[in-house]
Amino acid sequence: MSKKPHILLFNPDQWRGDVMGHLGNPAAITPHLDELVATDAVSFSNAFCQNPVCTPSRCSFMSGWYPHVRGHRTMYHMMKPDEPVLLKTLKDAGYYVWWGGKNDLIPPTSGFDAYCDVKYVPERKPKPIFGGAFEGTGDNWRGAPGSDTYYSFFVGELDTGGEDDYYDSDWANILGAIELIKNPPKDQPLCIYLPILYPHPPYAVEKSWYNLIDKFSIPERIRTEHLSENKPSILSGLRERYSMQSWSEESWTELRATYYAMCARVDHQFGLLMKALKDAGIYDDTAVFFFSDHGDFTGDYGLVEKNQNTFEDCLTRVPFIVKPPASESVKPRVNDALVELIDMSATVHDYAGITPDYTIFGKTLAPLISGETEEHRDAVFCEGGRLHGEKHCNESAPANEDSTMLYWPRGEMQRSEGPEHTKAIMVRNHKYKYVRRFYETDELYDLEQDPAETQNRIHDVSLAKVRGELKERMLNFYMETCDVVPHVRDSREKK
């Protein structure tokens, strides 16, 4: 059997798919990703997640299942011991699996031993994330309750305390991974899983990265005055609770520039890992996967952060870059085929020579990466939300208007028994996006004429045929993926 490649899964959190230089964004500072795509990798410009929040998306791309297959559509329903997880598959196949970073995948009570050889804990204690934004330390950056900054997630500059960088858990895990690359275990292929926190809000970054961003080059945001009235009510509900309607365009630009700078910081850290692989002489033997779990509003539609059941491209389109090992063919370029994050695990299986012993809905990207084909899927899907009465699916943000919880606005939307929080699903192809919504109006967008998804044309008679075709495609999707039958059959004979 041929030697198994090393695998690096670099997984930043909440990175929008359009904030990369090689995709034509003039304000994005991503030289290391751009160089990788120019020389050794393929960047998929139409890659989509299967749920717009963290845990459901991670459960999906680590299993190769859509969220509906086993009900993984909340922040509190993680992978169970009997369910397939890529990390466990690799560990069982002889990989030395090193996990450095956040979880949002398995219940901590399950333990990590089945999934990795090392769940990394740095020797040097990191500083609080985002300058203590979640821990309540540092300056009162939020402003007074009821102010237009209280739920903005905007922190701004991180105080490094005289050091070059703000040593948080991201830096700790990146440096830990570099140490592992320098001193790997003998006679075992490596799998390094780095689910880091940036550029997840709060929006906070060192001044050195902020200074790199040309604020005047940031593409224009999608503004609320351009939206049709039949957009999902959760969007207007969040805008009302965020209370950011008074923000000037200059203030929005500051927030967006900070987010871009957070992405630049992550690109730099990724570059350090690529250098470490080259210095250790294992770059050619390593399959590198760079992808995010979902995107971020970052001012689009007058919103920050994310939500659970709308599917705008800024939330659902993600960066997805793959460098295969040198033993596999690659045609470096940007490819615009429709791909899904569940294709990640299928591609890892392919490169590692693993035949999964369970049904997987992802499809290997190897033929796209080699240039053998330029087509992959005819449509992509994303799903989220809950039904009325499914209170066990709610987030834990307290139902108290005086709460200091940053996620209170999102929690209020999820607790709603009105139309604001509903179960919904998206089907998207290159030209159109259709969203089926319970309790309120469906959505239909002509992406060629309206790429910002400002005009919901669900009742446009000229698009009736398109609407019917997409509904049919959605029905086929559910029939194809509604369940998984175990590959091991039960015996019908008595022993």
Image (tube, helix red, strand yellow):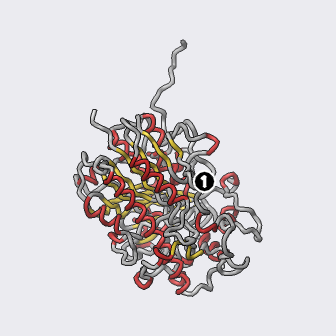
> Where does label 1 land, which residue?
74
User: How far across and how far down the image is residue 341, in percent?
Assistant: 43, 54
Q: Is residue 358 left or right of residue 4?
A: right
Q: Would you call the spot at circle 1 few (<14 residues within 10 Å), some (14-19), or many (20 or more)?
A: many
> Which residue is at 58% across, 62% downward?
308
Q: Is residue 403 above or below residue 219?
A: above
Residue ranking furthest to the top: 495
Residue in the foreground of this view, choosing between 308 and 185: 185
Residue in the foreground of this view, choosing between 253 and 295: 253
User: How far across and how far down the image is residue 207, in percent?
Assistant: 50, 76
> Which residue is at 46% across, 49% downward?
193
Say which amino acid is labelled 1: Thr
Residue in the foreground of this view, choosing between 292 and 132: 132
User: How far across and how far down the image is residue 153, in percent?
Assistant: 61, 72
Q: Is residue 271 above or below residue 156?
A: above
- Find residue 335 and report its image quarter: bottom left
* Quadrant including the C terminus: top right
* Quadrant including the N terminus: top left
> Which residue is at 40% across, 62% downward?
319
User: How far across and how far down the image is residue 268, in percent?
Assistant: 41, 65
| Residue 170 seen in the current view | yes
- Find residue 19 and report its image quarter: bottom left
Q: Is residue 227 above or below residue 20?
A: below
